[in-house]
Amino acid sequence: MKRDVIVAVSFLGAFAFIAYALVYANVLGLGGAELRPLGEFYLGHAFAHEGLTSHSPEVVTAIVWNYRGFDTLFETFVFFLAIMGAFSVLRLTDEQEKIVRELEAKEPHRQMDLITRSTTKLVVIMIIAISASIALHGHLTPGGGFQGGSAMAVASLLLFAVFSKFTLERKGLNLRHTISAYALGLALILATVLAPVFLYGGKVLEINLLPGETGLFNLDVGEYTAVTFGFLTVFLVLGVSEWIFKTVLRGEVDD
């Protein structure tokens, strides 16, 4: 116990010293430095109201979507291909999935003590609230759907570790539902980036043509949904015990 206190105080002291050196002592010489021409250009054009602009009132989000919008969009589909690739490689037939469920039912379902389970429930609730705030306010503050979805994925990992994947599946979070929710998030993203083309004769991702901040909000919600359930889909697939997976693939199931 004494050693833990010493380590904690040491880390706190080191953090305070580094913060003082960087902020007040300006040891790196960054304080008062003038903006580079590239930085001035971005800040001067981040809130442009013509062309492919997001109309975000927050400069980080405005720069991301004004100058990296297509890159962010393609990242989403690379993530989609990675998930579908993993799912295709590890996908089982209906008969194999039935055998997996039977073998999993025979496994001892261990769960952690009451304190750990209760604490995890509270932490998961906080993670859900924070991740939703990051995603839903992504058009106003630094953050967005991908960051919120990544934070939400941590909640599912906590539930896996403390309650096991069987608990989530019994609550309805099975592969069929997670893939459906994932597809819904992707559909919302596609509808948002294509809406300017079909409704206003604009270009792909010209979301400034949509009313108000609808475009950015839809993209954040779609990304949040896709990332959250995309990760959860992978976790459910990889959550099958190794010995069960090998047994099913090798056909070594006792009748």
Image: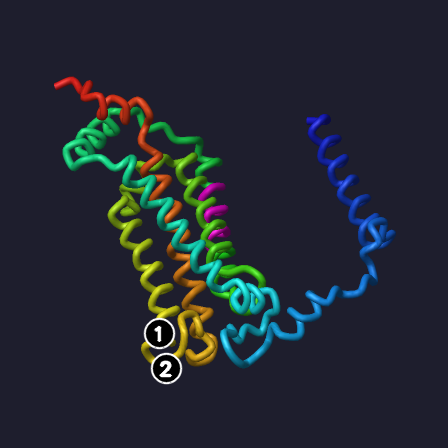
Colour scheme of the picture: rainbow
Q: Residue furthest left?
A: 255
Taking 38 as reference, is 77 above or below it?
Answer: above
- Look at label 1 and name its amino acid: Ala
- Name the image quarter holding residue 96: top left
Q: Position of residue 192 (x, y in %)?
A: 38, 69
Instruction: Name which residue lies at 36% across and 41% down.
Output: 234
Q: Position of residue 40 (x, y in %)?
A: 71, 70
Q: Position of residue 149 (x, y in %)?
A: 45, 53
Q: Residue 20: tell me if it is visible.
A: no
| Magenta span contains residue 124 | yes
- Name the image quarter holding residue 143: bottom right
Taking 171 as reference, is 74 above or below it?
Answer: below
Residue at mark 1: 195
- Look at label 2 and name its amino acid: Tyr
Q: Position of residue 16 (x, y in %)?
A: 79, 45
Q: Main secondary structure of the magenta part?
A: helix
| Magenta span contains residue 35 | no
Side (left or right) of 192 relative to 15:
left
Q: Do residues under tags 2 and 1 come within 8 Å of each other at their CB atoms?
A: yes
Q: How many callouts does the rendering have?
A: 2
Label 1 neighbourhood size at 10 Å, few (<14), some (14-19), many (20+)? many
Taking 120 as reference, is 113 above or below it?
Answer: above
Residue at mark 2: 200
Q: Which residues are magenta?
A: 119-128
Give the position of the C terminus as an image quadrant.
top left
Instruction: Name which residue lies at 69% across and 29% down.
Output: 4
Instruction: Name which residue lies at 46% across and 79% down.
Output: 212
